[in-house]
Amino acid sequence: MKPAAFAYAAPRTLDEALELLAEHGDDAKVLAGGQSLVPMLNFRLVRPALLVDVNRVAECGTVSTTANGSLHLGALVRMATLEADPAVRAGWPLLGDAACLVGHPAIRNRATVGGSAAHADPHAELPAALVALDARFRLRSRRGARVVAADAFFTDFYATALAADELLVAIEVPPGTPRTGAAAIEHAQTHGDFALAGAAVTVTLDARARCTGAAIAIFGGGAIPLRASAAERALVGTGVDDPAARAAGELAAAACDPPEPADYRRALVAELVRRALLAARMRAA
Amino acid sequence: MTTLSVEVNGRRYERAVEPRTLLSDFLRHDLGLHGTHVGCEHGVCGACTIELDGVPVRSCLLFAVQVDGCRITTIEGIAPDGELTPLQLAFQEAHALQCGFCTPGIIVTLEAYLRSHPQPSEDEVREVLAGHLCRCTGYQPMLTAVRAVTNAQP
């Protein structure tokens, strides 16, 4: 239960961090909050030659709102900040809802948004919320910068579009739409443990409480956080009442390809999507 | 080996450590502060919880080299020497521990939580305690102890 030996570097600037990744690439692991990586190191599931601790790269630690109203989350923003930050809570409540489901407070005081995204655990809450919100991922390397959309960032179980020399530096979330409600719900066998399955959803209503758009992202439903687009389309024009939410839940479950216990996870997805949609509709109204 | 300088319980320490030394092991083996207990070493049990720059964290999920320049409070620094905090006294009074292995982490977590939430509901306290494994089934007396220091009704 002790990690194998590794070399350690704690760059102070983004350029230094990118330099280290350019040089050591595949042999290096980026250490952010460490709440997933350090257990894996302790179990010796990973044995990197070099740990690049990016916690002291100040430019990756800030929360701000951009000129076009998007939310800019530095990759090192902690889960606890998503729960507490008034601007995040007001404008992007799905993020705080999802963050509250992650582990326990002591874990959320360290765990970072960028670390959760880059780790890409298909059972993780925050990646699903980011997929539901059409987030964009800002990647940097010494070769340059690029922006990857959420639907292209997560590629497989614990795999992302990040190249070995790239660092996820920030996540941008587009501005919310008025009359939108959000909810993230999961089922875990033990409180604070990984979820078997869960849903992160938003529902937008018009003045007559008819749904004009919905976003449904599933975690624990397959190799990556999944958008249930057929279910989203089926909700448009409905009042997101119980029959509509139930039908959407079943469509979402049908879109999943979960690991074992697959039938149980599909049943959970159907019910959790239903509950999340009803909760989001109440908050939108 | 990397040299680090860290303030623990108000005292400054400078030590050379291997990068792979966990903070929990550093506190226990290098500084001799054995009050921080090591249970699972993967962040689940909560026994190794300490305060890092004012917030509770799992010391088994940090490397000692990461806390260079930081301020740490362990269970030894929760109360002045020879004294107990009101919460610790309430734990004693309510028999909120049996073997005591989980207790340091729980006290550190609750002290920090009660500072920012002086009048928590019972559900909120349960939520906080859920991050700590106690296998002597001591949770009910812990709730009694918290109730005693917050003057809350059950």
Image (cartoon, coloured by chain):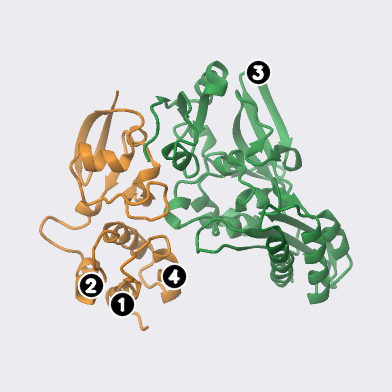
Chain colours: A green, B orange
- Tell me the SS state at disc 1: helix
- CA distance separating discs 4 and 1: 14 Å
Question: What is the x, y in percent for residue A278?
Answer: 73, 71
- CA distance separating discs 2 and 1: 8 Å
Q: Relative to A23, is A4 above or below?
A: below
Image quadrant assignment for residue A114: top right
Q: Residue furthest left?
A: B82
Q: Amino acid at mark 4?
A: Glu
- Tell me the SS state at disc 2: helix
Q: Chain of mark 2?
A: B
Residue on which the image places disc 3: A143
Residue on which the image places disc 4: B124
Residue A82 in sight from this viewpoint: yes
- CA distance separating discs 3 and 1: 59 Å
Of residues A261 and A284, the one nearer the viewer is A261
Q: Chain of mark 3?
A: A
Of residues A216 and A138, the one nearer the viewer is A216
Question: What is the x, y in percent for residue A71?
Answer: 65, 46
Q: Are marks 3 and 2 on the same chain?
A: no
Of residues B69 and A69, the one nearer the viewer is B69
- Tell me the SS state at disc 4: helix
Say if mark 4 contacts mark 1, CB within 8 Å: no
Image quarter hosting the N terminus of chain A: top left
Q: Relative to A218, is A29 above or below?
A: above
Q: Amino acid at mark 1?
A: Thr
The answer to whether residue B69 is left or right of residue A196 is left
Residue on which the image places disc 1: B144
- Tell me the SS state at disc 3: loop
- CA distance separating discs 4 and 2: 18 Å
Q: Relative to A172, is B68 above or below?
A: above
